[in-house]
Image (cartoon, helix red, strand yellow):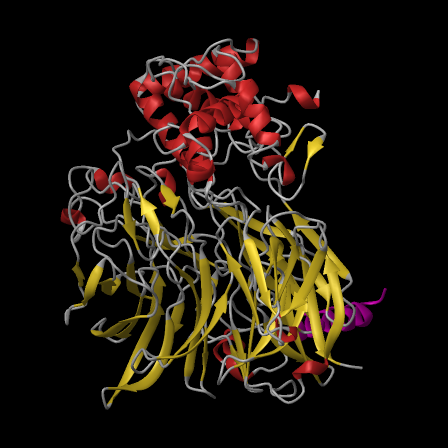
Amino acid sequence: MSKPYVMAGALLAIVATSAGQVDLGALARSQEDNESWLMYGRNYSAWRYSPLDEINTENVTGLVPAWIFQSGVAGKFQTTPLVHDGVMYVTGPSNHAWALDLKTGRQLWHYSEPVPEDLPLCCGKPNRGFAILGDRLYKVNMQATLVAIDAQTGGVIWEVESADYRVGYSNTVAPLIVKDMVVIGIAGAEFGTRDFIDAYDAETGERLWRFWTVPGPGEPGNETWGGDSWKRGGASTWITGSYDPELDLIYWGTGNPGPDLDGSPRPGDNLYSDSMVALDADTGQLKWYFQFTPHDVHDWDAVADPVLIDMEVAGEPRKALVQANRNGHFYALDRTSGEFLFARAYTEVNWTDGISPDGRPILIPGHEPTDEGTLTCPGMGGGHNWHATSYSPLTGLYYFNSGDGCQIYHGAPQEFVEGEYYLGSAMENVSGEPREGSIIAVDPTNGDTRWRFPLVSPPSSGMLSTGGGLLFAGTMEGYFMALDARSGKPLWRLQTGGPVRAPAVTYRFQGRQHVASAAGPSVMVFRLGP
Amino acid sequence: MTARILALASAFSVCAAAQQLQSSPFNGDKESIGAGRAAYRLRCSACHGIHAGGGRGPALNRGKFEAGDTDLDIYRIIERGVPGTEMPAYGARSTEENIWRIVSYLRTFEPAPEEDVQGDAQVGEQIFWSKGGCGACHRVGRKGGAYGPDLTRIGRSRSVEHLRASLLDPDDDLPPGYFVVRAVHRDGRTTTGIGVAFDDFSAQLRDSTGKLHSFLREEVRSLEREYTSLMPSGYGESLTADEQLDLLAYMKGLRGREAE
């Protein structure tokens, strides 16, 4: 080949690559990009709201499958698919992932990596999705690694270990891209790990900063852990945070302290467990924190989506951060300072007389887990646990699910054994009281519950709201459904044949709106027929 | 990880690689037993009780076990489960070490006298098939109805206390899959039966004749799931105290032989 042809070929390759690339500007403008779904929460504010309205309350009954991808992989599909440039990128359980042709659902490539047999796990082998930047995808693997993947081929570019899985660390979180960095959390609190939030160079995989969610000796907050209990303090970070580019702050929720149910080895508030932390994006330095459940003994992680809404609270404009917390309360904070604005219970709560003006729960005695057991509401899974939530600027409502009911909490001292469960005892269901749930619509400006759609089982799926006035969600029994976002009335449903454990996404492809969701071991894509 | 646990784990690895262990390497080790108790509470307590005193599953705190009394017997039951019962196999869900730790925890209970029922099992059998009317809904071997749970092996899987509670208060602890579904039709008629499936939009139930009914919520006035038993609740009055003991003695002896 002569030189001019080589150059022309190289130029074409660059143009082709550029067309498929996602730059930082595209991520910043993701809310306006109706052809794509570029990050876990759709935008940096974690709204999971799309303005697309072709599918709406008037015609949603006309939804039909466009295609179904059968993965052939067993396990919990909790992924948020990413959509870009004619391709859907899906992660699955047990370190599997796929690129799918958006037109047909045909597989373009399949990535997989074995899960070590000696990996200690509390909750299955799910994964919640990719992040995308440039022509690369980023995902975590179960064995606490972060891997960069070529979006065109599925080939591994680099893989780095963020922690030693043998001592109990694992990972399931969808990464968040912030300023050429890949930001991830970690899991492991059920095994007495000390957890963190990490940022890695998206180009090289080099770790740029780490924020320990349990402070070490000499650091502020370490005094809230008795003795050396901070070493096993947990505070996992297994759900993706959000980011405010203007304030340049990353918001991330943290999980329970360890051991989960026995507070005796860890006297004190146990910072920064069950907290919202705001980190300087460049350095990972803590700017503020708010602890929802000090000295938690009920496994009430505060990892749920930190959703950023500019709204009026008590007549005053606020840059707010809202969270439906697992302890049974909906919270609004000022995201510039962490100031507590208000909290309202959204499900049955019997452990507190409310939240005091400084944001601290007013405890009702008698709810510490004991050897014989204490009845406390909500149960261990919440309240709202981790499932993706949605804020609709169209309706002004915030949507999340809730496990409703109580459980019996047993607590007992337990010696720590590295790599083994470190719970401090266990849970028991209340005889004759099945665990149920609901999908809830809350006015985020005051915490008022506007409507509630009851579920016969604990909730399983995340939320998607749209400009068509719809809320998409699913159930453990396999229904994928559309509710009227204003009233909660069910408008359309399909029995998919498998539990819907994932949040839906929506995008426009070839001029038509599509809605996609994992269900069972499959990914299903719908559009209006024919 | 303490040096002692490391040494134990190391010894375990060597032993396990060489041959099938006959007894738990963790017996008597406080930390391992604590870990075993934690694993027990996580995996086993829902059926066998938070303190191993039994419930839906047999009591495990008496030092005697249905499947045999050696450590290896207990290990194999946890590893492989008990086919035909609600006891699942944990071999694929747990490490060998963790199973041995659970065995060591169960070994901490002092042997207790076997549960005894002062009743006549032969008389109890007659009551079961006649006065009690139990056979109308419950199957033993190839005989009896299929509306209620199969009791062919019930003496192996339930403690006497649990059987007694179920006889006198059928709502006390419903077996999995035996909730009630009640459909109220638009004309006010009611169809009630054992729930086969129940979700946010539909329910399937089997009535006392064995007929399957399927309802969509929009087809009926209401569709409710109730965690109560369809079994009559008056056995505390309709049977004398001696007859109750006779019936319990019969059920305690139901260990699957009839089906073999």
Q: Residue A3 lies in magenta, yes or no?
A: yes
Task: Say which of A36 and A383 sits in front.
Answer: A383
Q: Position of residue B47 (x, y in %)?
A: 46, 35
Q: How many marks?
A: 0
Q: Quadrant of residue A303?
A: bottom left
Determine whether A349 is above or below A14 in the image.
above
Q: Residue at x 54, y 84 (%)?
A: A32
> Where residue A262 sits: x, y (%)?
25, 40
Residue A281 on the magenta segment: no
Residue B181: x %, y % from top left: 57, 58
Query: At x 29% / y 19%, what residue is drawn?
Result: B30
**In the rendered image, the vertical position of residue A191 relative to residue A287, given as above or below:** above
Work out which quarter of the rendered image holds the N terminus of chain A and state it: bottom right
Q: Which residues are magenta?
A: A1-20
Image quadrant containing the C terminus of chain A: bottom right
B258 with respect to A134 (left or right): right
Q: Main secondary structure of the magenta part?
A: helix
Q: Nearer the viewer, residue B33 or B237?
A: B237
| Res. A36 in view | no
Percent coordinates x, y for residue A479 in the rendering = 62, 65
Of B129 and A25, nearer the camera is: B129
Measured along the vertical axis of the image, is residue A517 above or below residue A76?
Answer: below
- A396 up-or-down from A521: above or below: below
Q: Is residue B246 left or right of residue B26?
A: right
Check the image and name the residue furthest to the right.
Answer: A1
Q: Does residue A92 show up?
A: yes
Question: Which residue: 51% across, 66% down?
Answer: A462
Q: Is residue A119 left or right of residue A107?
A: left
